[in-house]
Image (cartoon, helix red, strand yellow):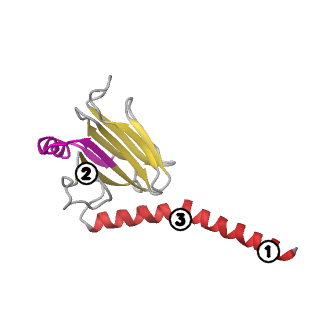
Amino acid sequence: MRLPMVGLTTFVIGFAAVHFIALNALPGYIMSTARDRLAAGGIETHTWNMSPRVTPQTQTIVRPSPDLAYSLCLIDVSAGPVELVVPTWPEYGSLSIFDAYTDNVYAGSLDARLPDAPGTRRIIVALAGQAVEAEEGVDVVTVKKPEALALIRRLAPSQGLYDAAAALVPVSTCGPV
């Protein structure tokens, strides 16, 4: 009777350890590795960066859509909140923010066709516990760790639309409040 209990106890402890690693340690490691690779590729913190148009030669991630223009910004709120100001887009567009655990902590539309769509979307990203003074119409997103990543997707199936999306990067901001 004792031997089955030892086996069952060992299984439960092993399962709990794997469960903890899979849900807690692995996502942080994945995001840290992604941020390190992006930084090694020349991506600076608090700067919007446009990816090249997706072609079979430029694919660096698994199955990106060739009809979308991607922009990203690495965020670090350790010194204080960061504000994102992003123009809307006349077609489908979205802004997502991922925390250090790879959780999508914000998902917003940039589609200018929606009723009451603002000309720009403003978001403040802050570390939990940081004081934030936000105006009306500004979304506040809190994260548990200082590192985050913002990703913009805009429908741009042609070179002309891709160029128009790229023209919005210099007028977008991602920086300390």
On the question of residue 81 being in view, the answer is: no
Say whether residue 94 is left or right of residue 9: left
Residue name at image x 50 percent, y 49 percent: 128
> Residue at label 2?
48
Q: Nearer the viewer, residue 60 or 152?
A: 60
Identity of the amino acid at label 2? Answer: Trp
Give the answer, above or below, for where 48 lies relative to 95.
Answer: below
Quarter of the rendering occupied by the C terminus: top left
- Tell me the element at label 2: loop
Look at the picture and state if 70 lies above or below 8.
Answer: above
The part of the chain drawn in magenta is: 151-176
- Identify the element where label 1 is drawn: helix
Q: Which residue is mark 3?
A: 25
Q: In this rendering, would 10 be left or right of 136?
A: right
Q: Position of residue 85 (x, y in %)?
A: 29, 40
Q: Name the residue that disc number 1 marks.
A: 6
- Nearer mark to the viewer, of 1 and 2: 1
Q: Is residue 113 visible?
A: yes
